[in-house]
Image (cartoon, rainbow, N blue to C red):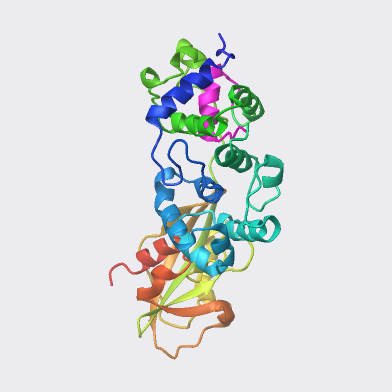
Amino acid sequence: MQPDQDGDVAAALLGWYDTERRDLPWRTPPGIRPDPYRVWLSEIMLQQTTVKAVIGYFEKFVSRWPTVEALAAADLDEILSAWAGLGYYTRARNLHRCARKVVEQYGGQFPRSEVELLKLPGIGPYTAAAIAAIAFDEQATPVDGNVERVVARLFGVQEPLPAAKPTLRHLAAKLTPARRSGDFAQAMMDLGATVCTPRRPSCLMCPLSRHCVAQANGWQAVIPAKVDKGERPVRFGVAFLALREDGCVLLRRRPDTGLLARMMEVPTTEWLENPRVLAEALRAAPVRADWWQVPGQVVHTFTHFRLELIVYRAVVPIESPLTFWADPSRCQWIPRRELHRKALPSLMRKVITHGLREM
C-alpha cells in the first residue's frame, strides 16, 4: 500500500489546514501575503526550539525591530541580550549577520529562491525551503522533524533515522503541490505537531489516515525508527558567584568564538571531563575571598554534552581587585537589579539562582 500520488494527500491536508491551522503571530490571515522578514525571523527562532518558547521572543523582537533594516542597524549585544534564554546563541549572531547582508547586498529584500537564500548566514536547506515556500509560495519542501515523522508513517518507511533522511526528503517533495506550497508546508508542520505526534498520535483525527501505511499496519509506535545515540559525555566545572557589598554581581564576557560566544557569564573554570580538576578550582577564583560552596550543583544539557557545575559564593568589599584568572578586561560588576537586561544564557541564570539560595 502506498499513499495516493494524484494529489489526494495534498488536497486532504490543505482542506484540514484551512479549518485547523494554528494561530501563530508570524502567520498572516488567508489571502494576505506573508512578510518574508517575519517568516525568516520565526524560522530561525524555531530551529531546535518549541513554538511555545518562541512566541514571546518573536513578539519582543518584532516590536523592537519591526523590519530587517531595523535589525541590521541594531547592536549585536542588544540582540544577544534580547535572545538570552532562547538557547543556541549562534543563531542570534547569524541573525544579525544575515540582516546586514540582506540590507547591504539585497536592498532589504529577501531573495525568493532556495539557491539565493542558502547564501545567507544561518540559513540551511530546511530554512531556505521554508522561507521560499511560506514567504514566496515557491514549490519548495522544508523537512523538519515533524515532517519526517508524518512522511515516514504515511509511506511506512522502516529505515531508521538519520539514514532515512534522504528518502523522506524525496517522498515529501513528491507530495508538495505546485500551488499553495507554503500552506502545504505549514500544514505538514501543524499535522506533525498536533496530530501525528511522536507518542500516541491521534489517528482518528488525522486527515491522512486513509492514506497512511503505518496506520493501516499498526506501526505508529515504531515509525520513525531511530538509532540510539547513546549517552552524552559529562563535563565538570566550578562557577564563582562574587557578590560585592554594594549589591553588584561579577560577570564576564565569553570569548568572541566558540560555545556561548560573546554572552555574559558568571566566571567559571574550564569545563573538563575529569571531575578531579574541581579539587584545584579555588586557584582560579576571580577575587581573593572566603568562598563558600553552595550545596548541590547546577546541571545543564547542551547538544553534545551534559555539564555539571559546582557553585562557590563570596561577598567581597567594593575595592576588591580581580585576579589574573578572571581576565579583568572582560569583567564587569553589574547591579543585581540590572541582570535581566544582560545577555545571560539560561545556564548562567540557573547558576545565579542557585548561588543566591539561602541568602
In which image quadrant can residue 201 be found? top left
Give x and y (percent) for residue 283: 53, 76
Q: Residue furthest front?
A: 31
Q: Which range is magenta?
A: 140-160
Give x and y (percent) for residue 248: 39, 80
Q: Quadrant of the N terminus?
A: top right
| Relative depth, front residue between 101 and 204 | 101
Q: Is residue 270 left or right of residue 119?
A: left
Q: Residue at x 37, y 68 (%)?
A: 355
Q: Residue at x 44, y 23 (%)?
A: 15
Q: Residue at x 51, y 22 (%)?
A: 223
Query: Does residue 144 show up magenta in the picture?
Result: yes
In which image quadrant can residue 4 be found? top right
Give x and y (percent) for residue 179: 58, 27
Query: Does residue 24 show up magenta in the picture?
Result: no
Is residue 85 in view from this perspective? no
Q: Residue furthest bottom?
A: 319
| Relative depth, front residue between 334 and 93 | 93
Is residue 136 in view from this perspective? yes
| Relative depth, front residue between 7 and 174 | 7
Q: Is residue 167 above or below residue 328?
A: above
